[in-house]
Amino acid sequence: MPSSEVMHKFKAGTLKSGRSGKTVTSRDQAIAIMMSEKQNEAEHGGTYVSGGERKNPLEGTRRRRHK
């Protein structure tokens, strides 16, 4: 998700935290998520789509087989 959407989702009450999936209630935690999203966008050259926002959430999670 683009970092600009993070605060909108926080104010709407739909922003979820990482592993636990609980709703974020702290403004400080929402800002930390936004900064993390900005860093991921910078590393990936533009928009970064996190695992929960992908069309297929299992895409790219398959383990490789050992030969």
Image: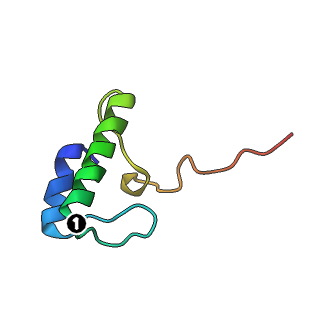
**Residue 7 visible, this orientation:** yes
SS at badge 1: loop
Q: Position of residue 39 (x, y in %)?
A: 33, 36
Q: Position of residue 18 (x, y in %)?
A: 41, 61
Instruction: Name which residue lies at 27% across and 59% down.
Output: 29
Q: Mark 1 packing: few (<14 Cα in 10 Å), some, or many (20+)?
A: few
In the picture as drawn, the residue positioned furthest to the right comes out as: 67
Instruction: Name which residue lies at 56% across and 46% down.
Output: 60
From the viewer's perspective, tell me whether residue 26 is left or right of residue 42. left
Instruction: Name which residue lies at 16% across and 55% down.
Output: 7
From the viewer's perspective, tell me whether residue 63 is left or right of residue 19. right
Q: Nearer the viewer, residue 46 or 19?
A: 19
Instruction: Kindly identify which residue carries mark 1.
Output: 26
Q: Position of residue 32 (x, y in %)?
A: 28, 51
**In the rendered view of the protein, which quadrant contains the C terminus?**
top right
Type of amino acid at the residue the image marks with label 1: Ser
Q: Position of residue 28 (x, y in %)?
A: 22, 58
From the viewer's perspective, tell me whether residue 28 is left or right of residue 53. left
Q: Nearer the viewer, residue 16 or 66?
A: 16
**Residue 44 visible, this orientation:** no
In the picture as drawn, the residue positioned furthest to the front comes out as: 28
